[in-house]
Image (cartoon, grey):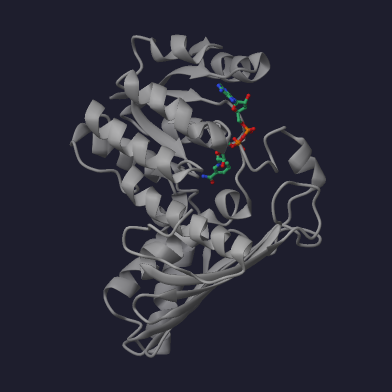
């Protein structure tokens, strides 16, 4: 049994509580939020200890692991305190917003002997696991190109719902908040990336960062890629998809939030065989991924192994996003070196 506490009792914390509820060897023991109403709503509903003060929360004698669900720009400082208190850490995406803070947190967790995992739930979706297998088994032949598309709607009410939303310091930008899931998948499935070139623009919202971003990528494998991210879609979310094309295969996973196989064709299977596979996968694919991520994190703790998305793994998409932003600012392609030294 692993005893969890949650810091930040907002929107995403609800998904973690539901997931913990479904896992036999996980238990929620404490919650922490600077907002009295928010922490009370969780502690009363789930009958657990509640803390306003994060330092006191970390002293809770039952607490073994902390799930960090606070605004993105606060993850590094909140994670650092948890590591220093000897607690295992599961951090909501984005890991952190700053590469040097990310490196420090990875090192600190190693030195304190605590596990550090990051929540990238798309990686564990059934359809994405199948796509990963298809890539790793060479079903596509030579991969020629790929694309990640996020065409979502975020309303003024969304940005007004919390003061951190839409800010560079605490929210980070469209690539850190919304598109990170898909960028992580492109990099995980087809990376490493060799070079990026991108444009960003603030077309609709009164926010500090861009609400549309488009990016071209060249992978080290020679494959090409594109990213299109927008939170301006009228009148509602349209699509979150990833497409991979090769000399012997075509796959498109789409829907409003990357949940359904829309194209699944491989030279090694007849059309009928591929359709049966796609139909079966689509019937299974309704999970959010949080439960599977927490289960994997518990295994990392109890078996002393690395989580599926460790801090080091999460650094890769952090660097890639920084490179894309660098390109939007300089209007130049950014070549990515193996030590990421070009990234500002
Ligand atoms: N994995 C996903 O699919 C997913 C989806 C949505 C959000 N997120 C991530 O989860 C994080 C939170 O997002 P959200 O939408 O739940 O935000 P939210 O605003 O709904 O909740 C954040 C909560 O943190 C509390 N808080 C802020 N600073 C605090 C502090 N220093 N100490 C204690 N409590 C503090 C706030 O009072 C609030 O209740 C963000 O990093 C976001 O990117 C991930």
Q: Where 267 falls versus 98 (above or below)?
A: below
Quadrant of the rendered image containing residue 296: top left
Quadrant of the rendered image containing residue 43: top right
Q: Where 245 falls versus 100 (above or below)?
A: below
- Can you say which quadrant of the picture contains the N terminus? top left
Camera sees residue 252: no
Residue at the spot 67% in from the left edge and 35% down from the top edge: 164
Q: Where 22 falls versus 133 (above or below)?
A: above
Q: Nearer the viewer, residue 118 or 330?
A: 330
Residue 34 position, x and y percent, is: 60, 17
Residue 141 position, x and y percent, is: 32, 86
Residue at the spot 60% in from the left edge and 64% down from the top edge: 330
Q: Where 252 falls versus 187 (above or below)?
A: below
Residue at the spot 46% in from the left edge and 55% down from the top edge: 122
Residue at the spot 49% in from the left edge and 15% down from the top edge: 54
Quadrant of the rendered image containing residue 56: top left
Q: Nearer the viewer, residue 136 or 315?
A: 315
């Amino acid at each position: 049994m692993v005893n969890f506490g949650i810091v930040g009792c907002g929107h995403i914390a609800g998904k973690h509580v539901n997931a913990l509820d479904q896992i036999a060897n996980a238990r929620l023991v404490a919650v922490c939020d600077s907002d009295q109403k928010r922490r009370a709503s969780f502690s009363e509903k789930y009958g657990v200890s509640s803390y306003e003060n994060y330092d006191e929360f970390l002293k809770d004698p039952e607490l073994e692991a902390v799930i960090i669900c606070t605004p993105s720009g606060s993850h590094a400082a909140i994670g650092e305190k948890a590591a220093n208190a000897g607690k295992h850490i599961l951090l909501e995406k984005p890991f952190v917003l700053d590469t040097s803070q990310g490196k420090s947190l990875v090192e600190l967790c190693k030195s304190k002997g605590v596990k550090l995992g990051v929540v990238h739930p798309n990686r564990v979706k059934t359809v994405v696991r199948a796509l990963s297998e298809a890539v790793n088994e060479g079903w596509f032949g030579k991969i020629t190109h790929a694309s990640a598309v996020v065409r979502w709607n975020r309303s003024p009410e969304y940005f007004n719902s919390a003061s951190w939303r839409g800010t560079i310091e605490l929210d980070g930008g469209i690539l850190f908040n919304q598109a990170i899931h898909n960028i992580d998948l492109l990099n995980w499935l087809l990376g490493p990336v060799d070079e990026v070139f991108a444009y960003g623009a603030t077309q609709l919202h009164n926010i500090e960062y861009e609400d549309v971003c488009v990016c071209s990528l060249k992978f080290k494998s020679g494959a090409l890629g594109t990213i299109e991210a927008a939170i301006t879609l009228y009148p509602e979310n349209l699509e979150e998809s990833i497409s991979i094309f090769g000399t012997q295969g075509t796959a498109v996973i789409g829907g409003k939030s990357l949940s359904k196989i829309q194209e699944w064709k491989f030279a090694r299977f007849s059309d009928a065989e591929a359709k049966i596979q796609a139909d079966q996968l689509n019937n299974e694919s309704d999970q959010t991924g949080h439960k599977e991520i927490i289960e994997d994190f518990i295994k990392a703790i109890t078996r002393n192994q690395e989580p599926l998305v460790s801090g080091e793994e999460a650094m890769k998409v952090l660097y890639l996003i920084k490179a894309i932003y660098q390109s939007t600012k300089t209007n130049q392609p950014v070549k990515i070196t193996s030590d990421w030294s070009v990234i500002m």
